Image (cartoon, rainbow, N blue to C red):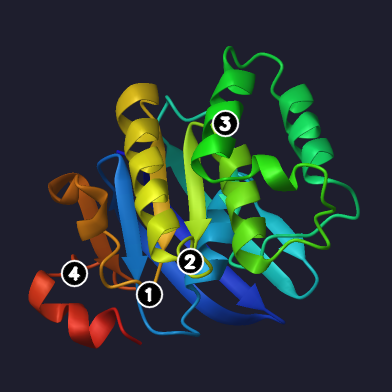
Amino acid sequence: MICSIRRLRAEVGGRALFDISAVEITGRCCSIYGPSGVGKSTFLKGLANGEAESTSGELTIRKLLRFNSGIRNIRYIPQHPPRFDFTVKKFFDRMLIANQDCAGCADTLDKICTDFDLHPILNARMTDVSGGQLHRVHLAAALSSNADLLLLDEPTAALDRNNVVILMRLLREFIDERSGYVICCTHDASFRSQGNFYERWHALDFPTFNPVQDDESDKIYAT
């Protein structure tokens, strides 16, 4: 189990965007599908700060939920990850300092930078890299950190096919070798099948959280 949600309600200016209750997200990896505008990204944000309620501008998230006891650190990558006015190397250095208790983080980061071909841009400013490179930088940092749970919003949207294959392999290693958990919101109809661990990757519809069957992919995944 990843988490048990007794209630998770998102309000914008006092109006409910969604109000979820009695949902359990099982397994180690789950993809969330649904049409645009129903609140999938907000749902991930609601999980991102753990069990605490939060308010940001007009958005208020009220919740009563419990994570698996093995989940202590959560890393969230939004669909449009932030750009900082310093180099990629400095961004990685800050991640490593924040994860000093993570044995092998630096070696893992170096390996993933090789996989994602990030070494040539280490001295580039994050404001100058392409959208695909920016996503790979944030993914490399998250996958190298001490995170137990990764929350990924449209992680393949800015990646070419080769980097999608690499990402899926890295996610499989994160789950199998580090006992990690992943929740992903995506419109990518082939997301699970590219992972080579299809049977363990649950697919759920948002906001009903009903299982998504393979023959429903055309009408749910493509919206």
Give the Cα separation between the discs numbered 2 and 4: 17 Å
Q: Are marks 3 and 4 in contact (CB under 8 Å)?
A: no
Residue at 25% across / 67% down in the picture?
190
Disc 1 versus disc 2: distance between alpha carbons?
Answer: 7 Å
Please tell me how crowded label 1 is: few (under 14), some (14-19), or many (20+) other residues with Cα within 10 Å. Answer: many
Numbered disc in front, either 3 or 4: 3
Q: Is residue 10 above or below residue 196?
A: below
Q: Earlier in the sequence, mark 1 or mark 4?
A: 1
- Callout 2, which amino acid? Glu
Q: Earlier in the sequence, mark 1 or mark 2?
A: 2
User: Which residue is located at x 50 percent, y 55 percent?
Assistant: 152
Label 3's element? Answer: helix
The reply to whether callout 3 and callout 1 are in contact (CB within 8 Å) is no
Q: Which residue is mark 2?
A: 154
| Nearer to the camera, 40 or 165 | 165
**164 sits left or right of 143 in the view:** left
Rendering coords of residue 92 (x, y %): 74, 35
**Of the image marks 3 and 4, the number of the one nearer the N terminus:** 3
Where does the image place residue 128, in percent across and percent down from the top left? 81, 63
Q: Which mark is residue 212?
A: 4
- Label 3 vs label 1: CA separation? 25 Å
How far is the residue under mark 3 from the one under mark 4? 31 Å
The residues bearing labels 1 and 4 have C-alpha atoms spaced at a distance of 13 Å
Q: Which mark is residue 144?
A: 3
Image depth: mark 1 or mark 4 in front: 1
